Amino acid sequence: MTMSPHEVQAYVLTYLEALDCQIMERSPAHVTVKLSPEADKALTNRPYYWGFVERTGAPAETMSFTFIFDPDSYQQAIEAAEAKVAQASPPVVPNPAGTNGVTNGNTQGEPPKETILGRYFGITPSLPQLGPGRILREEVVYGSRRLQQIFGAAREGGAFVNLFEQAAKRQLRAAAPAVYEPWLGVCFKVEFACDLKREELHFLGISLRSGEIIEKFGTKLNRRDLSPRLAENMHVQTAKVSLVDAGAALESHLTNRLLELDYSWAEKAQERLDLELDVLDTYYEAVLREDTPEVESTSNTASGMENVHSNRTPPAPLKKVLDITNAKPIGADAELAAEAVVPIDTETEAEEKAKQAVIDREAMKLQYETRRTEMIWQYEPKVKVTAISSGMFHLR
């Protein structure tokens, strides 16, 4: 699922207009807006500033943003505007005074104004504008941090609403008050998920007077003028169905609708899951059943070396073998040298290798269980229903 720049812009503008933000400049690629206090609290993360304003009663100064929805088009528009201004501006005439027509922020012909920095450093460049009057620039595209923040603020602020249908002007002068009928509206998000995913929105409404359920409740609301303020000369009827019973009725109605759908996709997803699990089980079964040849070969080598030493007879003195008169008996030194050449693994080393083999086997078992759990989570078919927003709607 993704959103085009046009869809992102439409969503952001709807959110800003709903919070009474002041639109200062707008184009197909961007919008410059001065935030309302409510939007500033939700988007700028300035709790200390707003705490100071609320404690002292000082006038609040909200921040301004330029939200860019199509960076390429916006950059092209800026370059075209700069080129147009450069063509329309007159050429710079050299100044006989030697300043090349550049003054310290003044028009040509006027004496430059003396500043403290200019007195010591000459002509100073203009500094960036700071403070409440500056306009921050951000790219708001699908997946950006700012758009995710707007999604969260809209979800939190619009999770529950209480709206009244506005009456006609003639009703304000009528003798008898008009009667409102209370409705509970809930927007459900249904997710059909396996290794693929599909989502649906179901906006259901139920009358708290008669218990009537309307499936496309949003269509009924679109034709009406709704406001959070109760109009004059209007009367709200008492509900006969409690909110708990109304919510349970909507959930039961949605469950019955979902049971009527075709779930062949779930059977195919289960078949893919069984196939993947068979491959995974076959692989790890072979890995976990194989022996540890390193440990066995090492132990066999150690035992063989010990047998060689036990069966070997000590060498005869060199004097007797070669019959050299001046040779000295060095049989003990030769035996020590031969023992040093032949490597022998001790029992401690064999035990450590056996323990390491057990640890490796346990790690392999844990890896197998983790892979199996992840595969079941990915491929197992499931239907998830979530109530993303709800509200009380008083309609005539």
Image: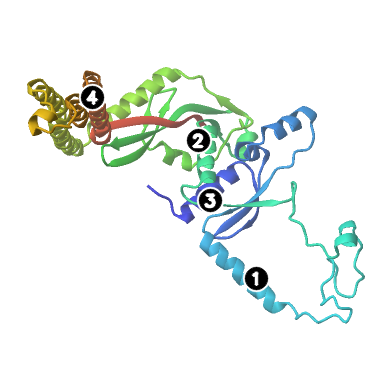
The residue under label 1 is which amino acid type?
Glu
Front: mark 2 or 1: 1
Q: Foreground residue, 3 or 319?
A: 319
The residue under label 2 is which amino acid type?
Arg
- In three-dimensional space, the C-alpha distance between marks 3 and 2, rounded to whole angstroms, equals 18 Å
The residue under label 3 is which amino acid type?
Val
Q: Residues within 10 Å of mark 3 (few under 14, many from 20)?
A: many
The residue under label 4 is which amino acid type?
Lys
- In three-dimensional space, the C-alpha distance between marks 2 and 4, rounded to whole angstroms, equals 57 Å
Q: Position of residue 86 (x, y in %)?
A: 68, 75
Residue labelled with disc 3: 140
Q: Foreground residue, 388 or 240?
A: 388
Residue labelled with disc 2: 155
Q: Residues within 10 Å of mark 2 (few under 14, many from 20)?
A: few
| Contact between labelled residues 4 and 2, with CB atoms less than 8 Å apart | no
- In three-dimensional space, the C-alpha distance between marks 3 and 4, rounded to whole angstroms, equals 57 Å
Residue labelled with disc 1: 82
Q: Is residue 213 shown above or below 125?
A: above
Residue appearing at x 44%, y 17% in the figure: 242
Front: mark 2 or 4: 4
Q: Position of residue 80 (x, y in %)?
A: 60, 71
- In three-dimensional space, the C-alpha distance between marks 2 and 1, rounded to whole angstroms, equals 40 Å
Sooner in the amino-acid sequence: mark 2 or mark 1: 1
Element class at badge 1 = helix
Q: Foreground residue, 361 or 110?
A: 361
- In three-dimensional space, the C-alpha distance between marks 1 and 4, rounded to whole angstroms, equals 74 Å
Residue labelled with disc 4: 353
| Contact between labelled residues 4 and 3, with CB atoms less than 8 Å apart | no
Q: Is residue 113 shown above or below 297?
A: below
- In three-dimensional space, the C-alpha distance between marks 1 and 3, rounded to whole angstroms, equals 23 Å
Element class at badge 4 = helix
